[in-house]
Amino acid sequence: MTSPLLHIQGLHVEFKVYEGLLRVLNGVQMAVHQGERVGLVGEAGCGKTTTMKCVLRILPSPPGRITVGRITFHGQDILKMSTQHVQRVRGRGIAMIFQDPTAALNPVFTIGDQLMTVIKYGSRENLGRKEVRARAIAVLQEVQLPDPERILTNYPVQLSGGMRQRVCIAMALSTEPEVLIADEPTTSLDVTIQDQILRLLGELVEKRQTAVIFITHSLGVVREMADRVYVMYAGSIVESAPKEELFGNPLHPYTQGLMRAVPKLTGGGIAEGIPGRIPDYLNPPPGCRFQPRCPQAIEGCELSSPPLVQVRPGHEVACFLFRES
Amino acid sequence: MTMGSRYGSAFARRWEGFRRGWYKFSRNPVSVVGLVFVFSISFLAVFAPYVAPYPEHAGRFVNFSEASQPPSWKHLCGTDVFGRDILSRIFFGFRYSLMMGVVVLALVVPPGVVLGLVAGYWRGTWIDTVVMRITDIFLAVPPLILALAVCSVLTPSVFNAMMAVSLMWWPWYTRLVYGLASSLRNEFFVQAAEVVGASRTHILFREILPNCVSSIFTKMSLDMGWVILIGSALSFVGLGAQPPTPDLGTMVADGAKYLPDQWWIAIFPALAIMITVLGFNLIGDGFRDLFALEEV
Amino acid sequence: MGILKFIAKRLLLSVFVLFGLSILIFLISRVLPGDPVRMALGPRAPEWAVQNLREQMHLDEPLYAQYYYWLSGALHGDLGQSLFTRRAVVDDIKEFLPATMELALFAGLIMAVFGILLGAVAGRYSNTWIDNSVRIFSYVGVVTPSFVFAILFLLLFGYVLGWFPTAGRLSPGITRPPVLTGMVTVDALLSGNFAALGDALWHMVLPAVSLALGGMAQEARITRSTISDNLRKDYIAAAKGFGVPERLVTLKYLLKPSLIPTVSILGLDFASLLGNAFLVELIFNWPGFSRYGINAMLRKDLNAVSAVVMVLGVVFVIVNILVDLVVAGLDPRIRLGAERGK
């Protein structure tokens, strides 16, 4: 396997709050290769967005803190880079589409202002004003927004949710990143729009051969959009495999629980949920974080956290039920 | 911890909420400091006749042999030109300040809140227009000025000062509650109550009002400070308490003449005002943080 | 367009409000115990003189008639006569108002500029010593009455250190520039008399700062907490995440939305400024409108009191409209909210 373009290794993050320290990320391990489409699945609150914010180094730093970890991009550790270097990686190297397009756009500036600023600082060449504007219009057309010139003069409040999300996608793509992080890009939209946006994203990514990290809590979406899937629970990766392998042969009890929880069109009764709740990050269980809810837990699961190991070709699990092959 | 009976469970819930709130509130050092200030001042005010070193100095008292003494062990804050102990007068002065705050708020909050509820619930109708226009009229004048104007036409006294401040203060509560009520009005729980046929009174006071309480409460704590500030400004000008009443504002005014030499006559009462207002401010901020966190 | 309609609506509303205010203040000033005419003329004036003046001021007639006389006079620019200065209140206004406006505007400027600056710096460097000192300062500023500041500054910087003058608008030796606006600084600037300009500013520093501190502290607090909140917002993270340089993000994309709550309360803070001017002018012996007003109130000078309240009401209304315009200018959501109904 070629070396990964983006490699997250052993990422631990804690948040300092009133009541103490929230140990949010507990050793996240992830690799993305050139042109690869990776899906990151997990329930709300498991740390997906936090991980991605670390990659771009935009984690809000008074409460949040990266305690241990390496995030390499083209072999260089992002966490150790100088501010100028990171700024160059942002946008041109890695770009992110936020979950809530309304929150991600500055309400008091026009779309044009924000988009053109991103293009200006994100491009590899020194562009003049006309060029920047032309590119802005071009990228707005790419995301199938009608009347791009007028949109440049609009404020976010004048656009609908779907249009705002298209603008955010446009902004992310305008810098021609090598890795695109799409953080639940359709969660806050209507179902009908969701489909359009997903299709659009798929096309654009296909066209440009950009690597994508597609974050979602929906198994259905990940199946459509990703080649390889990472399953995340309570701050760490519990399983990762190529898409068909994962859906065909889920190994980790949590993944199995997730699959069971999806209702099937072919019938077979009401889908089952997974009993229990996500752990308290203030006092997380010392061993495997899923152990309190795990129907297959064995002795020793509560003592230490299982490492992510490869048990079949391309298939990794973090569970004491399996041995490294 | 269970309280089995039906009466018990509602009470237990309220008590639990209160305890949780208190826990959060007490974690914030700033609020605790404010609480300490306010309690101490209230204590001093209530028990002034017993706690003050020279309680008789609060009234008509002269002793020229001890006049204008700088701070000493005998008189911790010094004496004024009549030989009265300033510290004792400050304790009694707290009475007037606190009384002003309490009375004004007691007069202002009920009608102000009710008007706001009514105007907010019937938003868009003539009731709304009338109430809010009247509120606008009262708010059209910078606060202190209206109070001064009203005070000036009445005989200067503490009572009249309180009336004047009340007259200009009520619109703020109406505005606050109007904003809250008119947005809450469209919430599901209100519509549900309407559909069920609940009376207007019930909706206003049992559905909408409880959701406004935290904002009202925060504002009240902060307002105690502001009212005391305005009250002291009125007394400073001579439109509030009259001599020999030991009011903090009047004391500052009297003492101002003797600056810089007998600085203690004006400075200690001024510090007393500041500490009082600070205490309420800190508590108010603490409440604001407390309720904001709960909303998240 | 939208803006003109907005202004027109506000003006209409303001006229109504001012009208209501005039009735309110009229009622307050007329429904009083005591005999203002007797007070004005003194205990030894003969009864016929008192009666004469009473008739002249229509004080014997029913309230609505009195209001009618007053209102029609006011609409013709005649606000009656002051019982004490014995001349038209309008003339009194012309003489004293500019001094107060000058002071208020200067104080307002200090308050807005430094308040926002301090708050922005504190917000940017949250939870450091810079932030903490600004917070302490703002607590002190907020709880201390203006008159206490005024006294302290007068004492410390005026008498003890002697850095600033303690009374008046100009030093005796300086010639006063020709009266164009009545505001000494503006007049001096317009007539090129820079010595007078400097001197006048020097005289304004202490009273203006005493007035401004309370509002400055408020502005600083609000700016600080807004900036500190907005720093965590997604749009800031997104801007940084796309590679926009941090400097630009802070100075442009963070600052503008953060100014909105601060500017919104500028109107209110300016109002307290006008209110506190009464005390500060008294302490610094500033020959201004508020001092005139306080004296009128203490002497129950009816026409003067009504006029003072009305004039300040008008000023406040204008300031509010301006503030609302600026806020609408900064925040497109307000401008456009009506259109989309979102």
Image (tube, rainbow, N blue to C red):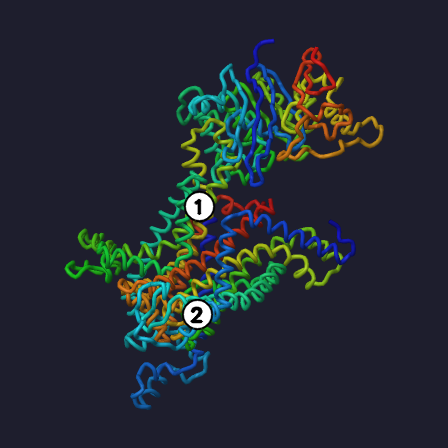
Q: Are marks 1 and 2 on the same chain?
A: yes
Residue A204 rendering spot, x and y as whole percentages: 59, 21
Residue A321 rendering spot, x and y as whole percentages: 74, 19
Q: Nearer the viewer, mark 1 or mark 2?
A: 1
Name the residue located 48 percent from the left edge and 70 percent from the top edge: B50
- Please identify the residue farthest to the top as the structure is shown: A1
- Determine which of the numbered discs, if any, sits on residue A63 in the image: none
Q: Report if the CB atoms under discs 1 and 2 are less than 8 Å apart.
A: no
- Please identify the residue farthest to the right as the structure is shown: A268
Quadrant of the rendering where the C terminus of chain C is positioned: top right
Under tag 2, what secondary structure? helix
Q: Nearer the viewer, residue B70 or B99?
A: B70
Q: How many marks?
A: 2
Q: Nearer the viewer, residue B255 or B59?
A: B59
Q: Quadrant of residue C151?
A: bottom left
| Subunit that carries the residue with mark 2 | C
**What residue sits right under mark 1 in the picture?**
C223
Question: From mark 1 to mark 2, how far is it between C-alphas?
Answer: 36 Å
Residue A221 rendering spot, x and y as whole percentages: 68, 26
Q: Quadrant of residue B81?
A: bottom left
Q: Nearer the viewer, residue A231 or A87?
A: A231
Label 1 environment density (alpha carbons within 10 Å; few <14, some 14–19, many ≥20): many
Q: Amino acid at mark 1?
A: Thr
Locate residue B151 relative to residue C49 in the image: left or right. Answer: right
Please tell me which of labels 1 and 2 falls first in the chain.
2
Locate residue C187 relative to residue B162 in the image: left or right. Answer: left
**What residue sits right under mark 2 in the picture?**
C22
- Please identify the residue farthest to the front as the structure is shown: B73
